[in-house]
Amino acid sequence: DPSTFRSMLQGYRNVQGKRVHTAFSRCWTRGRVYIADEVDNAPGHVQTLLNSALANGHAPLAWGQIPKVEGFAFVGTGNTPGRPTREFPDRKPMNGAFADRLYFLHWPLDPAIEARAGGLPCPKPPKPLPSVVVTPESWVTWVWRMREWCASNAPTVHVTPRASLSGLVALAAGEHPVDV
């Protein structure tokens, strides 16, 4: 939340000079998954620290620039796509550089969980989207068109080369183009 200090992520040294780790620094140095809950409400200085670590492969911890250990993964959760919404007006816009390092997933509510909790029969799952083949050329061309459209119609939406690169990775992993 807005009261988060950098030291709550990067750790600090105690009065004896010993390293005091945080959940983030432990995950970073031990190759674990770090889950940042409500990351869409993180203050700018925390976003900058995470951006630096995720973009460069080394984190500015309290005892130096420490390389990422293999196996580390970052998962950020939140209620918005990194900017205020009607439902969450107190969120401030996420730093563009930090948001550009992330891959956003829409995670809809699961009515089957509610049904099971209430002792109701589970609803039928939605029909899968029809299969579509998207070539790398068509994906990158589409991203270019979106960049051009956003420049004129939604100037606060930044469509960077990461949209092309991350999209190609997601498509190669089997994600549906509508989700990508």
Image (cartoon, grey):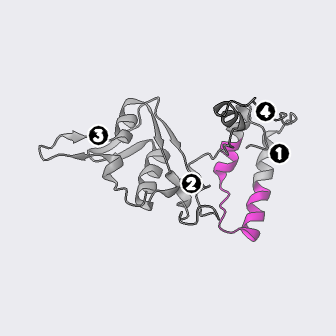
CA distance for labels 3 and 4: 45 Å
Residue 81 at what x, y percent from top left? 62, 55
> Quadrant location of the N terminus?
bottom left
- Looking at the rendered structure, the kind of residue marked 3 is His
CA distance for labels 2 and 1: 24 Å
Closer mark to the observer between disc 4 and disc 1: 4
State the residue position of label 2: 99
The secondary structure making up most of the magenta span is: helix
Q: Tell me the number on the disc at residue 138.
A: 1
Q: Residue furthest front?
A: 119
Q: In front: 36, or 16?
A: 36
Residue, x 72% and y 31% (percent of image)?
120
Q: Are marks 4 and 2 in contact (CB under 8 Å)?
A: no
Residue, x 78% and y 64% (percent of image)?
149
- Looking at the rendered structure, the kind of residue marked 2 is Ala
Q: Which residues are magenta?
A: 144-167
State the residue position of label 4: 123
Closer mark to the observer between disc 4 and disc 2: 4
Q: Secondary structure at mark 1?
A: helix
CA distance for labels 3 and 1: 46 Å
- Occupied quadrant, residue 45: bottom left
State the residue position of label 3: 21
Whether residue 157 is situated above or below residue 22 in the rendered picture:
below
